[in-house]
Amino acid sequence: MEREIVEPDMKFYTATEYEMMTLCEEHYEREYVEEGWPDPKSKGYPNQYLDATYFMLVCEDALVGYTSFKHMGTYILVGNTYVQKNWRGQNVHSHLLNHRNKYLIDTFGLPILTVLNPRDGVSVEQLRKTVSSLGYEPCEIYTNVEGFMDEVEWLEYGWHEIWRLNA
């Protein structure tokens, strides 16, 4: 069933991981729920990401999709985006990410980083295309992040591509 994105019907909420997990287990059928909520560490995120905040898109009290972010002190780390299957192919993914990024820039005014970590059949090329279309730029050397990230953190992410969106 195809749905058209109608701005007034869409609402954005933030939630803790526990609130998000509870909401999904109580109200939505998802492949994650039967197997247990995915631990961000299992998806390649650092331990500090374990208490991330979820940014949810809801339409008429139904969860459409979500993404996540973690305030790291001097920058924001983003990741973990999911769109319900019946909403895919309708530009919801970009809509959700654009609103999340605007919220983060308006709220915190810090650089936003994403770590490209291909999962669930998505290629690194597709991830590059997506983040590039959102205005992110690759951080290929430490000097691209040294004003807000220490070298130890840089090395923790070093085996993945890091991309930056300036506030």
Image: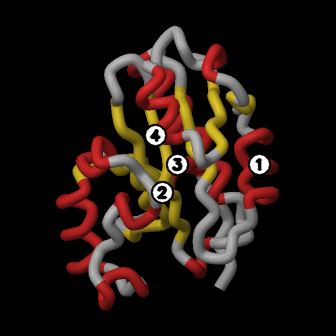
| Front tag of 2 and 3 | 2
Is label 4 or label 2 in front?
4
Question: In terms of secondary structure, where does tag 1 sit?
Answer: helix
Give how far apart the Cα atoms at labels 2 and 3 are: 25 Å
Q: Earlier in the sequence, mark 2 or mark 3?
A: 3
Location of mark 3 (residue): 8
Quadrant the C terminus occupies: top right
Residue bearing the label numbered 2: 80
Mark 4 or mark 2: name the one nearer the start of the chain.
2
In the picture of the structure, the residue carrying the numbered disc 4 is 156
What is the secondary structure assignment of the residue under circle 3?
A: helix
Image location (x, y in percent) of residue 14: 32, 45
Disc 3 residue type? Answer: Pro
On the question of residue 53 being in view, the answer is no
User: Vertically, is 149 above or below 127?
Assistant: above
The answer to whether 108 is drawn above or below residue 42 in the figure is above
Q: Secondary structure at mark 4?
A: helix
Q: Which residue is mark 1?
A: 128
Residue toward you, 18 or 42: 42
- Determine the CA span between mark 1 and mark 4: 20 Å
Tell me, yes or no, if residue 22 can be seen here: yes
Instruction: Name the side, left or right, on which 6 lies relative to 75.
Output: right
Q: Residue furthest top?
A: 147
